[in-house]
């Protein structure tokens, strides 16, 4: 996972897995990024292949923390498989998922 900053937002790239084995360090880095920055925190999920309930909890927790520090958590590059999981759990209604450029046009 890498954190990249720009004037209006920070971008955090998530690796291939967000599960019980990887959630603790990811959660810690997201919390630090949220506490230290300003503007949107964009999670680039384009490399994410697997997420479990613990990983979904990390996303929800980061969303809540973002709200508490008056920021917004944005999911970018969500693969179709992960998007289906978000839809089944209805988290796509809670979390802000950035629409692909092709879908906007």
Image: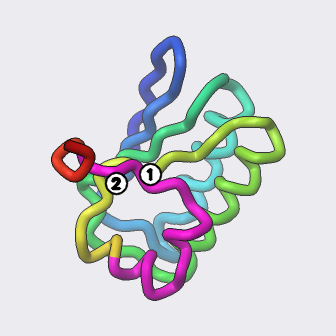
Residue 23 in percent (x, y) is at 54, 65
Q: Which mark is residue 93?
A: none
Residue in the foreground of this view, choosing between 39 and 19: 39
- Give residue 83's quadrant in the image: bottom left
Q: What residue is shown with label 2?
A: 45
Region in magenta: 84-100
Question: Can you say whether 60 is above or below 13 in the image?
Answer: below
Residue positioned most to the top = 7
Q: What residue is shown with label 1?
A: 75
Give the spatial CA distance, label 1 vs label 2. Answer: 7 Å
Question: Can you say whether 72 is above or below 10 in the image?
Answer: below
Q: At numbered mark 2, what does the secondary structure look like: helix, strand or loop? A: loop
Mark 1 and mark 2 residues within 8 Å of each other at the beta carbon: yes
Residue beneath the point at 50% across and 46% down: 74
Image-based side of 89 in relation to 45, left or right: right
Question: Can you say whether 8 is above or below 41 in the image?
Answer: above
Question: Can you say whether 15 is above or below 42 in the image?
Answer: below
Residue 43 in percent (x, y) is at 44, 46
Answer whether residue 26 is magenta in the image: no
């Amino acid at each position: 996972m890498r954190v990249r900053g720009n004037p209006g937002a920070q971008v955090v790239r998530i690796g291939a897995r967000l599960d019980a084995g990887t959630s603790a360090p990811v959660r810690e880095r997201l919390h630090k990024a949220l506490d230290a920055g300003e503007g949107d925190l964009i999670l680039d999920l384009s490399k994410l292949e697997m997420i479990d309930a613990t990983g979904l909890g990390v996303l929800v927790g980061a969303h809540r923390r973002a709200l508490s520090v008056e920021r917004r958590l944005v999911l970018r590059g969500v693969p179709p498989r992960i998007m289906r999981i978000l839809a089944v759990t209805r988290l796509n209604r809670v979390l802000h998922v950035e629409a692909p450029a092709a879908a906007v046009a």
